Image (spheres, grey):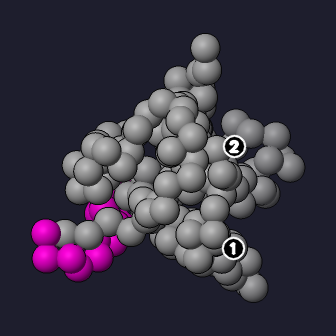
Amino acid sequence: MRSERHDKKIAISHLEKARDLYAKFDANRDLLKSLPEEQQKNWHNERIECIFDLASTVSRWGIYENNYAYWHRFWAERDDFMADTAGEEDFDEYYSDWQWRRKRPIGLRLDNNGKPIFATAPKKYGSGLQDDQKLLFLLAEARELDTTDTKRYTGLSWYRQAMLSRARLGMDRLNQ
């Protein structure tokens, strides 16, 4: 039995709690006094790094994995919207040689008129959001919180968003 999806939910839950705890320091700076002196200096950057950890965990074991197994193994993440729009016959949840060798991999979502559907960042974070929406929100949040002189976290956020888009929608996906 494989437990990747179950483990992912638990990890995300813990990281979301950590994200909320870090946010409390922004809301009430007096709480910082309860931390050791070294942690008082670095808590804000640690908050952003926690957001990156959460975004990384959200992107695992699903459509962002650049792994050949995603396309044909029976434990691949099921996406009901994709199964409906691409057709059930194109998205089997079990292992088969046909699934592995199929000629039309599932990629960019299309509406009824054949126009691409891209995820948009929601205005508020919630545990019930889809992975795409969570990622966009979290990476934007990291950019907003970046107070470094060099905008280090802003650059990392844009880079991670680009690499996730590439993994999801890039030509590498078609090559697999």
Residue linked to disc 2 = 33
Q: Nearer the viewer, residue 171 or 117?
A: 171
Q: Mark 2 vs mark 1: give the one in front.
A: 1
- Residue range (magenta): 112-126
Q: Earlier in the sequence, mark 2 or mark 1?
A: 2
Q: Residue at x 56, y 75 (%)?
A: 170
Q: Nearer the viewer, residue 96 or 61?
A: 96
Q: Is 113 one of the magenta-colored residues?
A: yes
121 on left or right of 8 = left
- Looking at the image, the residue that sits furthest to the top is 1
138 on left or right of 39 = left
Q: Residue at x 50, y 55 (%)?
A: 102
Q: Is residue 153 visible?
A: yes
Residues packed near mark 1 inside 10 Å, few (<14), some (14 to 19) or many (20 plus) = some
Tag 2–tag 1 contact (CB < 8 Å)? no
Q: Main secondary structure of the magenta part?
A: loop
Q: Give the label on residue 156, or none.
A: 1
- Looking at the image, the residue that sits furthest to the right is 38
Q: Residue at x 80, y 47 (%)?
A: 39
The amino acid pointed to by label 2 is: Lys
Q: Position of residue 52 (x, y in %)?
A: 64, 56
Task: Relative to 169, say whether 51 is above or below.
Answer: above
SS for dot 2: helix
Q: Nearer the viewer, residue 89 or 62?
A: 89
Instruction: For the C terminus, give its image quadrant.
Output: bottom right
Q: Is residue 29 visible?
A: no
Q: Is 141 one of the magenta-colored residues?
A: no
